[in-house]
Amino acid sequence: MIRTTRLLLPFTHGVEMDTLEAAVLLAASHHATLVPLSLVPVSQARGKGARLEHIQQSKDFLEAAQQKALQYRVPLERFEAFTGDAVQSITILVEQLACDGMILALRGRSGSLLSARMIERLMAIGPGPLYVIYLPSKAPSWVSRLIERFSRRPGQWQHIEKSAQRPASYSEQATPEMVLSRYAGSPDIEQ
């Protein structure tokens, strides 16, 4: 039996259907199994667990990923992990889940499904091949018009963009405690 390519799709917040659709289509184009991984943040303070809204958003993401995969007939395996350090957990799980690569999504200067900071850290660590999807920014129409207007004036907009950048810093921490579970109801889709 030939093993198919497996692509990890990590998630911490912000279920965006166009990002999910792009990830599913990327997996389909590579004849890959999509491995959506929802990382639920858990406070490292003693006695505190995950917040209910984070758990619900995780369930919503995994359900939406399943629906998109069914729509395009892409095989998938869904996982949910409760963790204190999402980036470190992703770097560990990409290997443990036998993934051949990871899908990351950027929307303008922001991240989609993950924060831009997390994406920056993952790109710096490079835990295997990365497939980066670039999506258009979802700026309100008045912001889009303002950006367009100022982008025609040389020198002014570039100064604003440079001042918005923050320096990158990454500090390694001990391996976080993590609970990983295969999400119930992962469909078996035949290709």
Image: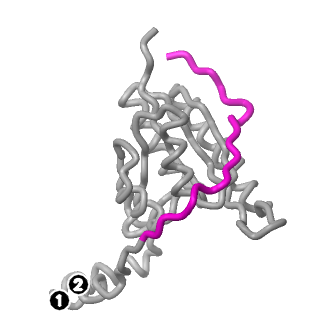
Instruction: Please give left or right for residue 4 compared with residue 13 in the image.
Output: left
Image position, residue 119 (x, y; %): 43, 60
First to last magenta residue range: 170-191
Image position, residue 183 (x, y; %): 70, 36
Image position, residue 73 (x, y; %): 52, 25
Residue 69 lies in the magenta-colored region: no
Using the image as rendered, state which of residue 108 and residue 115 is in the foreground: 115
Q: Between marks 1 and 2, how big is the CA–CA gap?
A: 5 Å
Q: Is residue 161 visible?
A: yes
Query: Compared to 11, does 24 lie above or below?
Result: above
Pick out the residue farthest to the top: 1
Q: Is residue 138 visible?
A: no
Pick out the residue farthest to the front: 174
The residue to which callout 2 is attached is 158
Q: In the image, which disc is placed on residue 155?
A: 1
Query: Compared to 20, does 72 lie above or below?
Result: above
Q: Amino acid at mark 2?
A: Gln
Q: Secondary structure at mark 2?
A: helix
Pick out the residue farthest to the right: 47
**Magenta segment, prevailing SS (helix, strand or loop):** loop
- Quarter occupied by residue 65: top right
Badge 1 vs badge 2, beta-carbon distance below 8 Å:
yes
- Quarter occupied by residue 26: top left
Q: Amino acid at mark 1?
A: Gly
Residue drawn at 60 percent across, 31 percent down: 77
Residue drawn at 15 percent across, 87 percent down: 154
Q: Secondary structure at mark 1?
A: loop
Query: Compared to 96, does 130 lie above or below?
Result: below
